[in-house]
Image (tube, grey):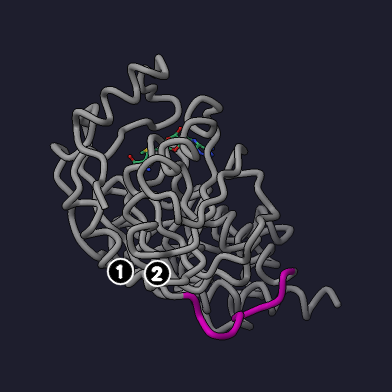
Amino acid sequence: MNLLGPAEIRDLAEMLDVTPTKKLGQNFVVDANTVRKIVKVANVEAGDAVIEIGPGLGSLTLGLLEAEARVVAVEIDSRLAEQLPKTVAALAPEAELTVVHQDALKVTELPLAPTRLVANLPYNISVPVLLHLLEHFDSLTSGVVMVQAEVGHRLAAEPGSKIYGSPSVKAEWYGDWRIAGTVSRQVFWPVPNVDSVLVGFERRADQIGTLEERALTFALVDAAFGQRRKMLRQSLGQVLGGADVATARLEAAGIAPTARGEALTVHDFLGVARAHLAAIG
Ligand code: SAM
């Protein structure tokens, strides 16, 4: 199949009168090798139910369809969402594609249950989109996404490292994350002013906690990293009802009240949440 190159991308953009906007993170991939690399790293197989967020002009979508995936693509920009089925009909008439014109942060139902996420995410909302999809689509078991390098390294960071933060712990709730490759700025139009990486994830076979536990764990994580320099007994006190209560819950979970959030795994935060929920009945 012919994938889209720089000339095709520019022609399509011109035809649609699309000037890429920063607000929507519109940096389109114009290199077929990069598209095929992403599809390969994501291990996409024929028949896979893939969700793509932000298909744009269709560069990656066509790569996924070339691998014979069944694709549901969620695009917020109406001009792009309307054009994509036409582009695909012309280049890959047999392909199985459904385009959903919606904000990915609001999507809670799809025409198929996606098992893989493969996307070049809009960079300004990449973490919220990932967490939203993992929260709402239990069928999603793995994925490979292109994100800003700094965000990718945060998602894959281990406790104790400088860049370990709220996205790292929340991502860890759902499974394992790894850096799966780097991508040159030159494969995009327009060329972005940040580096990009591919991040892969595998969802855990079993949830580590209930929805109630997750909500409290995430609130604790936000409090801990919102005030990174403070000791946990202070930062968590804001959520748990004071430093004394936080100290008791941390001790019950076997964590030093003087520790800081960057030292804790998701299981540690979950332990504190469980201690609190048990104590308040
Ligand atoms: N996949 C295309 C590619 O690789 O060339 C485009 C990727 S571009 C980095 C991000 C895409 O996400 C754009 O098409 C943009 O319009 C779309 N987008 C931005 N915010 C979105 C949102 N909230 N929901 C769905 N799509 C969004």
Q: Judge left or right: residue 175 versus residue 41.
A: right
In this figure, which residue is indicated by the disc labeled 2? 201
Residue on which the image places disc 1: 178
**Which amino acid, mark 2?**
Phe
Mark 2 near ligand 1 (CB under 8 Å)? Answer: no
In the rendered image, residue 33 lying in the magenta stretch gets the answer no
Q: Residue at x 47, y 36 (%)?
A: 86
Residue 104: give x, y in percent of width and height.
57, 44
Q: Residue furthest right?
A: 281
Question: How many residues crowd around disc 2 within 10 Å: few (fewer than 14), some, or many (20 or more)?
Answer: many
Task: Give the left or right position of residue 67, taking residue 236 as reference.
Answer: left
- Ligand 1, image quadrant it occupies: top left
Cα–Cα span, label 1 and label 2: 6 Å
46, above or below 198, in the image: below
Q: Are marks 1 and 2 in contact (CB under 8 Å)?
A: yes
In the shown orientation, is residue 97 left or right of residue 278?
Answer: left
- Identify the element where label 1 is drawn: strand
- Residue 209: image x %, image y %? 65, 78
The stretch of residues the image draws in magenta is 203-211
**In the image: residue 47, left or right of residue 154:** right
Marker disc for residue 209: none
* Element under disc 2: strand
